[in-house]
Image (tube, rainbow, N blue to C red):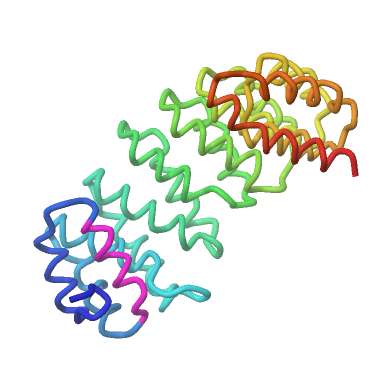
Amino acid sequence: MSRKKWTSEKIFTRLLNNKTEQTFWDNISELRKRPNKEVYNQAFNLAKSEIEKEKIIGIYVLAQLGFNPRFQQGKTIELYFDLLNNENSPKVISAILSSISHNNENLNEKQISKLIEFKNLNDSNVRYDLTLAISCLENDDAIKTLIELSNDKDSDIRNWAVFGLGTQIENDSEEIRTALWNRVNDNHFETKSEAIVGLANRKDKRIKDIIISELENGNYSSLLFEAILTFKDKDYLPLLNNNLKKIKTDKDDIKNGWVLALEETIDELKK
């Protein structure tokens, strides 16, 4: 029988006895499609459990229960912050922070300050999910924390922090630009690319030489082409055309895969 035809009670039972990560998320996803009191109340009660596994299940179900608006979102946010006040398990804290990232549009100053308390926790999963939780927030303390996290030793955290600073907020300041410039030579390619597009979003003309260098070295990415189009600078056309000619005759399948992106970028710049 299809999971869609299972009762919510059956899915909760399967979750509590779950064996694989894939079925765990399949079951969570199905419950999230059922924004009703039955599912909400059972997930809410699980989130308040003293048993870690039960608590995490409840937290994750509530995170995206329904959409626009979430089902009883205000009550859920209150629960998450109540839990954070007394929680010591990194796994549970991580689950809460991840879940708040899906419900962070109306956080107040006190709640944001509470989230920031976890920035130095010696657990990369917690810091990663904190990065998600405070992204999109046009808040000075949240932005300052993202700047700090953009220097994290973990590349995934740096990547999402730079994405948060460069693309998910409109705020522009010397501190933000400096943080992005600090990552334009990051050894993690995606982090570097996010920094480039973040500076392009702010029309920082100094990034032009970096973009040219990336093109000359064949370091293509969708983010690089996005940065180029942000400027709408036709000065890139000769280099882009030259690169297109080269990769069309290149036997490297990976480089050949960028033909369409190059063609689309060139066509857009010609308009």
Residue 12 position, x and y percent, is 17, 71
Q: What range of the chain is rendered magenta?
A: 23-35
Q: Nearer the viewer, residue 211 or 247?
A: 247
Q: Is residue 157 left or right of residue 170?
A: left
Q: Residue at x 77, y 19 (%)?
A: 212
For the N terminus, the image quarter is bottom left
Q: Main secondary structure of the magenta part?
A: helix
Q: Residue at x 16, y 52 (%)?
A: 20
Q: Residue at x 37, y 64 (%)?
A: 63
Residue 2 on the magenta segment: no
Q: Nearer the viewer, residue 111 or 254?
A: 254
- Looking at this rendering, what residue extends furthest in the left direction? 17
Residue 244 position, x and y percent, is 73, 25
- Can see residue 198? no
Residue 28 on the magenta segment: yes
Q: How many marks overall?
A: 0
- Looking at this rendering, what residue extends furthest in the bottom direction? 37
Residue 151 position, x and y percent, is 51, 25
Residue 233 position, x and y percent, is 88, 33
Among the 4 quarters of the image, the one containing residue 38: bottom left
Q: Is residue 214 left or right of residue 255?
A: right
Among the 4 quarters of the image, the one containing residue 255: top right
Q: Residue at x 47, y 73 (%)?
A: 67
Q: Nearer the viewer, residue 198 or 106?
A: 198
For the C terminus, the image quarter is top right
- Can see residue 159? yes
Q: Nearer the viewer, residue 100 or 252?
A: 252
